């Protein structure tokens, strides 16, 4: 008997979720997660691969090795009073936060990749320390103002799983990065 075939289907963008710790807790276990996305029309992780190329003197072709990544998520958000993510970034912008002052936690959740059913679902996710870089604030006359910022990843992600309890994500470290 043949193995069950997983159907091929497109994933909708809302199923790739990003949450920021708006409390800037020292550890992700104390995070107050708020979903990134209110009045944000695009947010993609740019992995910015770092590579090294070398060519042996006896070879006709060079070899390129990926040596690391420098991931970022650039965000352009319309100014949205009352949104916790906008409030956090505004606070950082107003005090021109630098170094540790602008660090917080990012929780990335693949809500399309889960086990269990309905309220008992467990999603694949990762938590990542980030540094928030405020890029621009304002905009053109007659248009809604925007606040643009970049989430700069700090170090390596911590893979794990995410459940949703009372409408809030709960992250558990360990496993979860297999496809």
Image (cartoon, rainbow, N blue to C red):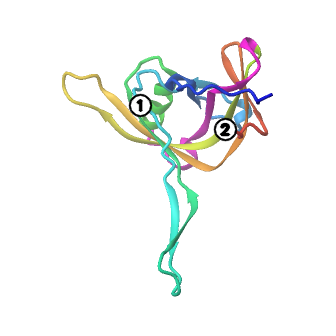
Q: In which quarter of the image is the N terminus?
A: top right
| Percent position of residue 12, x then y | 51, 23
Q: Is residue 155 above or below residue 31?
A: below
Q: Which of 137 and 8 is in front in this view?
A: 8
Instruction: Say whether disc 1 or disc 2 marks the residue closer to the N-terminus.
Output: 1
- In this rendering, the label closer to the viewer, 1 or 2: 1
Q: Quadrant of residue 164?
A: top right
| Percent position of residue 103, x then y | 58, 42
* Left or right of 66 on screen, residue 25: right
Residue occupying image coordinates x 49% and y 74%: 62
Q: In which quarter of the image is residue 136?
A: top left
* Left or right of 114 on screen, residue 81: left
Q: Magenta segment, which residues?
A: 95-119
Residue 67 among magenta residues: no
Q: Nearer the viewer, residue 154 or 26?
A: 154
Q: Which of 2 and 77 is in front in this view?
A: 2
Q: How far apart are marks 1 and 2 (CA)?
A: 20 Å
* Left or right of 134 on screen, residue 6: right
| Percent position of residue 80, x then y | 40, 20
* Left or right of 95 on screen, residue 123: right
Q: In which quarter of the image is the C terminus?
A: top right
The residue labelled by disc 2 is 127
The residue labelled by disc 1 is 42
Residue pushed farthest bottom?
Answer: 57
In what element is the residue under mark 2?
strand
Residue 110 among magenta residues: yes
Q: In which quarter of the image is residue 30?
A: top right
> Mark number for residue 161?
none
């Amino acid at each position: 008997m043949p193995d069950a075939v997983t159907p091929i289907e497109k994933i909708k963008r809302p199923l790739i979720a990003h949450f920021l710790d708006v409390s800037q807790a020292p550890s992700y276990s104390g995070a107050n997660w708020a979903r990134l996305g209110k009045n944000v029309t695009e947010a993609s992780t740019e992995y910015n691969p770092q590579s090294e190329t070398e060519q042996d003197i006896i070879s006709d072709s060079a070899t390129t090795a990926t040596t690391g990544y420098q991931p970022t998520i650039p965000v352009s958000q319309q100014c949205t009073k009352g949104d916790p993510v906008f409030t956090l970034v505004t606070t950082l912008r107003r005090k021109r936060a630098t170094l540790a002052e602008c660090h917080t936690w990012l929780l990335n959740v693949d809500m399309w990749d889960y086990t269990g059913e309905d309220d008992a679902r467990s999603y694949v996710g990762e938590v990542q320390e980030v540094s928030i870089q405020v890029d621009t604030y304002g905009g053109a006359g007659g248009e809604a103002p925007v606040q643009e910022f970049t989430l700069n990843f700090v170090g390596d992600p911590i893979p794990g799983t995410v459940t949703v309890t009372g409408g809030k994500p709960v992250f558990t470290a360990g496993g979860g990065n297999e496809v």
